[in-house]
Amino acid sequence: MKRDETTCKKMWKGSRSAMACLFAMAILANAPMPAAAQQFSADLLARKDDTATTMGTLRVSGGKARIDATALPDGFFLLDTAKPAAYFVRPAARIYMKAMQSSPLTQLFIPVDPDDPCRQWLAMAQLSAPVDLATWHCQRDGEDVIAERNTDVYRITAPSGLSFVGWIDRARGFPVRIKTADGTVIVADHIRDESQPAQTFEIPAGLRKFDPQALIRRIQQSDVWVAPPASQ
């Protein structure tokens, strides 16, 4: 930018070229720069009544997230809302698998478009199980302030107790609070805005994909399989 400004000043004084150049430089100097993808980490805490429980840790970079759940210490979840995809990775066992219904956290704490979060929430829910669109509803329900940050409130109505309310931090494009159907409140606590290594959100090299359906088919073909009665 400085070099371009010097070039402008070297032009003939008062010439149209110099005036046009300086005018263009002024526009560029005030033009907004593209926002960088949000990167941060946080702790996940659940509160119900007077009890607080540590759920795990969260890391986010752009449209990707990683959740290390306390209840599943032998692995971690990798989420990618752009694909969309949700995997549970077990490095020690050298395998990874689709997350499916391993944890409701993979459907709740995901990067979203603050102007249309319903689309990402629905896509991640469909990864776990088929969604009946006739009974799944998502709508904006006002605004609120969480930890001195403005949030948009969305209410999701779904069958089988999967309804929840989400508070989305618009600047981060991420829900910082979720209230589930049973009254449990899960929050992204102690949020730390910091860069995240790209490999944090990648499946480690050398791991094989575990297919539970393939395992079931192998068992069905073995001598230990006993087919259920036709009535079942």
Image: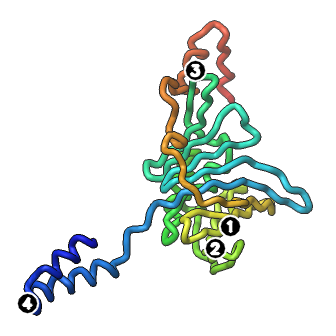
- Residue of label 3: 215
Using the image, determine if residue 29 lies above or below residue 36: below
Q: Position of residue 151 (x, y in %)?
A: 62, 74
Local SS, label 2: strand
Q: Position of residue 2 (x, y in %)?
A: 27, 72
| Callouts 2 and 1 close, C-beta under 8 Å | yes
Using the image, determine if residue 155 lies above or below residue 223: below
- Say which of 224 and 125 sits in front: 125
Mark 1 or mark 4, earlier in chain: 4
| CA distance for labels 1 and 4 | 61 Å
Q: Position of residue 205 (x, y in %)?
A: 48, 27
Tag in front: 1 or 4: 4
| Callouts 3 and 4 close, C-beta under 8 Å | no
| Crowdedness near tag 4: few (<14), some (14–19) or many (≥20) residues, C-alpha within 10 Å | few
| CA distance for labels 3 and 1 | 37 Å
| Crowdedness near tag 3: few (<14), some (14–19) or many (≥20) residues, C-alpha within 10 Å | few
In the rendered structure, find residue 165 and report the number of the disc placed on it. Answer: 1
| Crowdedness near tag 1: few (<14), some (14–19) or many (≥20) residues, C-alpha within 10 Å | many
| CA distance for labels 2 and 1 | 7 Å
- Residue of label 4: 15
| Crowdedness near tag 2: few (<14), some (14–19) or many (≥20) residues, C-alpha within 10 Å | many
- Residue of label 2: 153
Local SS, label 3: helix
- Tell me which amino acid carries mark 4: Ser
Q: Image quadrant of residue 16? A: bottom left
| CA distance for labels 2 and 4 | 55 Å
